[in-house]
Amino acid sequence: MGRNDIKFTIDPGKRFTFFHDASITYSSTESGGAAEVGQVVTCTADDTVGLITDGDVFLGKLILVEPDGVCTVQVEGIMDVPTDGNPIAFNNRIVGGTTDGTIRAATTGDEITARGVVINDSVDTNVARILA
């Protein structure tokens, strides 16, 4: 007999540490060390990440921010990330969304920067499950 259902567990994937820029602010009172934890980041300088902006290359999901200016980013695996509120269809590649820290579907002109693929577009409102 075969399986009757498919289950995805959010994969911790590969995680790397980077410095973060001023778009991410450490806070000892926030879960994970910053209000931006859970949002999407891109490289903004050598060894440095910041919140992704419209059309930027998706690097990963911000997991943890430390008080010394270092943060942890999930760069590979299955992850749920915020969208900019516009629908992203299954199997679309992604880039930075129109709201900082979010993603959107790649469109014509985004071919070079597009990365990852949406594997479930119905996870939750304004959230897509991606494989990066």
Image: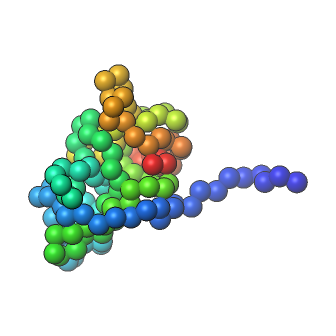
Q: Quadrant of the N terminus?
A: bottom right
Residue 13 point in image, percent of width and height: 47, 61
In the picture shown, does residue 77 fall above or below 122?
A: below
The residue lying furthest to the right in this view is: 1
Residue 127 point in image, percent of width and height: 42, 48
Residue 115 point in image, percent of width and height: 40, 40
Left or right: residue 124 versus residue 84 is right
In the image, what residue occupies the spot 44% across and 43% down?
116
The total of numbered circles placed on residues is 0
In the picture shown, does residue 36 fall above or below 103?
A: below
Task: Pick the residue in front: 45 or 127.
Answer: 45
Task: Pick the residue in front: 50 or 112.
Answer: 112
In the image, what residue occupies the spot 77% across and 52% down?
4
The residue lying furthest to the left in this view is: 22
Residue 2 point in image, percent of width and height: 83, 52
Residue 84 appears in the figure:
no
